[in-house]
Image (spheres, helix red, strand yellow):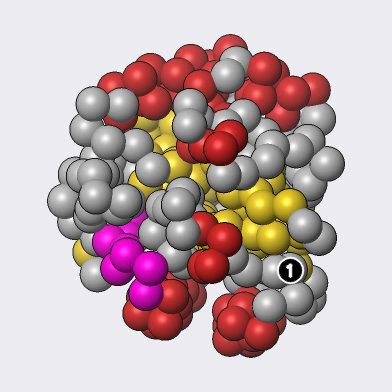
Amino acid sequence: MILAAAQTKPTRGNIDANLLDHYQFIELAVQNGAQLIAFPEMSITGYERENALELAFKKDDSRLNHLKKLAVENKIIIIAGAPVQIESQLFIGEFVISSDNSVAVYTKQFLHEGEDEFFQSSFNYNPMITIENKNISFAICADIDNPLHPENACKRETDIYVASIFFTPNGIPNAYRDLQSYAQKHKMNVLMSNFSGESWGYPSAGQSAFWNNKGELVGQMNDSDSGLLLVENKNDDWKSRVVVN
């Protein structure tokens, strides 16, 4: 099994440019044999609050078509984030685009302070997927601040916990501490993807990372590069490498 965390530098509000970046990262992941690629929080738009509604996607959004095509043609699962509108409600969400041309939506369950002015939270959209008999579940940013989230993932027999985040340099030490703790406590492998460039006018901390189910840090990126953190499992032994874009 090979998984990829994409560490990207979003262009604020420029969906076309960000999607082009996604296509390039996906091609790079495919070239390196990845079966799944996870992007950061709201990766398609960059992190937004005030203008999230005008940037919002729907589940059947035609702008997802090329991502779906890439998933099918390359047999790769793509986790890409955006503000998501479901009926009349707006969520911080991500699309789980599978190689069978299906699209599932995950919505952020625990909002960061101030997000509730613009977004709803919901536990109703919480898909789980399987690769090589390993159960994979998802988290978005502040979800990882609440220990209930990984605890619930553990109860669902999650093997791999994929966290798409936007953490600044001030916040990233806490993210590392918490994710390491969850990996060890719940015996889950943890893959985390973060931006490396500015978003919403704030710097991002990069340092996308992977912990095995013993809580050991297997691999990480630096705070400034864009690229992929690739992790490969052979006989329950994880190895990592970084490919800079």
Residue in the picture at 81% in, 30% down: 156
Residue in the picture at 39% in, 59% down: 46
User: Where does residue 65 sit, x and y in percent of width and height?
Assistant: 64, 85
Amino acid at the residue labelled 1: Lys
User: Where does residue 243 sit, x and y in percent of width and height?
Assistant: 27, 63
Q: Is residue 145 magenta?
A: no
Residue in the picture at 42% in, 82% down: 16
| Callout 1 crowding tier (Cα within 10 Å): few <14, some 14–19, many ≥20 | some
Q: Is residue 13 magenta?
A: yes
Left or right: 198 in relation to 51:
left
| Secondary structure predominantly adopted by residues drawn in magenta | loop
User: Where does residue 213 sit, x and y in percent of width and height?
Assistant: 55, 26
Residue 190 seen anywhere in this rendered image of the structure: no
Label 1's element? loop
* Residue sitting at the far left: 224
Residue highlighted by disc 1: 59
210 w.r.t. 90: above or below: above
Residue in the picture at 48% in, 26% down: 113
Left or right: 56 in relation to 199:
right
Q: Which residues are magenta?
A: 6-14
Q: Nearer the viewer, residue 89 or 245?
A: 89
User: Where does residue 14 sit, x and y in percent of width and height?
Assistant: 37, 74
Q: Nearer the viewer, residue 172 or 209?
A: 172
Residue 11 seen anywhere in this rendered image of the structure: yes
